Amino acid sequence: MARSLAVITGASSGIGRVFALRLARDHDLLLVARREARLQELARELRSRHGGAVEILAADLTDAAQIHRVAERISAAQNLTLLVNNAGFGLRRAFWKTDLELLERMHRLHVMAVLRLTHAALRVLVEHDRGAVINVASVAAFAQRAGSAGYGATKSWLASLTEGIHLDLRRAGSAVAVQALCPGFTYSEFHDVTGDDRNRLAPPSLWLTADQVVDASLAGLERRAFRVVPGWRYRLLLAVLTRCPTWLKLRLEATRA
Ligand SMILES: NC(=O)c1ccc[n+]([C@@H]2O[C@H](COP(=O)([O-])OP(=O)(O)OC[C@H]3O[C@@H](n4cnc5c(N)ncnc54)[C@H](OP(=O)(O)O)[C@@H]3O)[C@@H](O)[C@H]2O)c1
C-alpha cells in the first residue's frame, strides 16, 4: 500500500528543504520548485536514506499553467495527507520603485498558487477526513515594514485565508487541520535573494534556524494549532503587536525607518 504523501513547494532550499528532510521518514514526497537539479539531488539523498518514493515536479509557481499542472497532480493523489505551501520570496524597496512585474509575480506565488493548490488539496483531504495544509506566512503578516508592502500584504492574506479555512473545517466537523506558520528572521537563502545584510536586519538572538521553524510547525500540527510562531521572542513580539493599535505600530515603524 502507498505511504501517505506530503507535497512541499519551495523544497529546493531553506525551510522547504528541511520540511522534506523531516517528512521523508514517514511520507512519500512530491517536491516542487524551479531548480530541478537541486530537487533531483535532494530526492536522491532522501530515497537512499529512507527508501520512500520521492517525486519531483519542476515548476514556476508564478505561472498559471504550471500552477495548474501541480494542482492536477495534487487532485489525483488519493494518498495525500499534507500540503506545505512554502515557496516564497521577499522584496525590499519602496512600493512604487519596485518593478511591477516582480510585485505581480510575488502575488501570483504567495496568493494565486496557494489558493489553487490549497483548494485542490482540501478537496482530497476533506473527502478522506484526514491530513493538513501548512501555509508558510511570516510575522510580517502582523506588522507592515517600510520596503515590504507587497510582502506584508500577501503574508497577511495568507494568515487570514488560513484562519477562514480553519473556521470552515471546524464548522464542517472535519478532522483536517490548517496551520499558518509565521516565522521571524530565519537563516536560509531568502536574504541572499533580497540582497540584505543579515547583520543589519536583526541581532543574532532574533535569527532562527530552518530546523527550529520546522520543529515548531510539526509540533504545532500535533496539537492542531491554526497559527504557529516559532521562538519565544517572536511569540512575545506578536502578543504585543496584536494588541497594539495600528496607528502606534505605523508610528513606531516610521521612526525606525
Ligand atoms: N527566511 C526568513 O527570514 C523568512 C521569514 C518569514 C517567512 N519566510 C517564508 O518562508 C518561506 C520559505 O523561504 P525560505 O526562508 O526557506 O527562503 P529560500 O531558502 O529562499 O527558499 C525559497 C523557496 O521558494 C522557492 N521558490 C521561489 N520562487 C518560486 C517560484 N516562482 N516557483 C516555485 N518555487 C519558488 C525556491 O525554489 P526555486 O528558486 O528553486 O524555485 C526555494 O525553494 C517563504 O514563503 C518565505 O516568505 C521566510
Image (tube, rainbow, N blue to C red):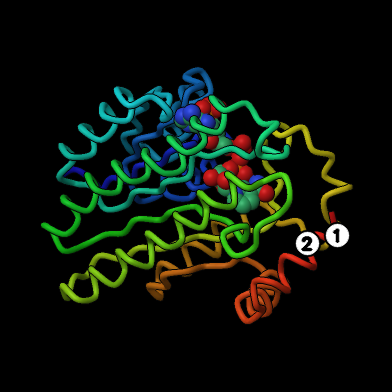
Residue 58 percent across, percent down from the top left:
40, 22
Q: Quadrant of residue 212?
A: bottom right
Cα separation, mark 1 vs mark 2, equals 5 Å
Q: Please state which amino acid type lies under the numbered disc 2.
A: Glu
Residue drawn at x 41%, y 56% is 134
Q: Nearer the viewer, residue 30 or 27?
A: 30
7, above or below 237, in the image? above
Against 60, residue 114 (above or below) is below
Q: Position of residue 89 (x, y in %)?
A: 59, 37
Q: Which residue is mark 1?
A: 256
Give the residue at x 29% y 22%: 65
Q: Residue furthest left?
A: 127
Q: Look at the image and tell me whether residue 210 can be seen.
A: no
Q: In terms of secondary structure, where does tag 2 sit?
A: helix
User: Observer-nearest residue: 206 or 45?
Assistant: 206
Q: Residues within 10 Å of mark 1 (few under 14, many from 20)?
A: few
* Position of residue 124 in the picture relative to residue 230 (left or right): left
* Mark 1–mark 2 CB contact (< 8 Å): yes
Image disc number at residue 253: 2
Q: Is residue 71 visible?
A: yes
Query: Residue at horizontal 62%, vertical 81%?
Result: 243
Q: Which mark is residue 90?
A: none
Camera-side residue of 192 and 130: 192
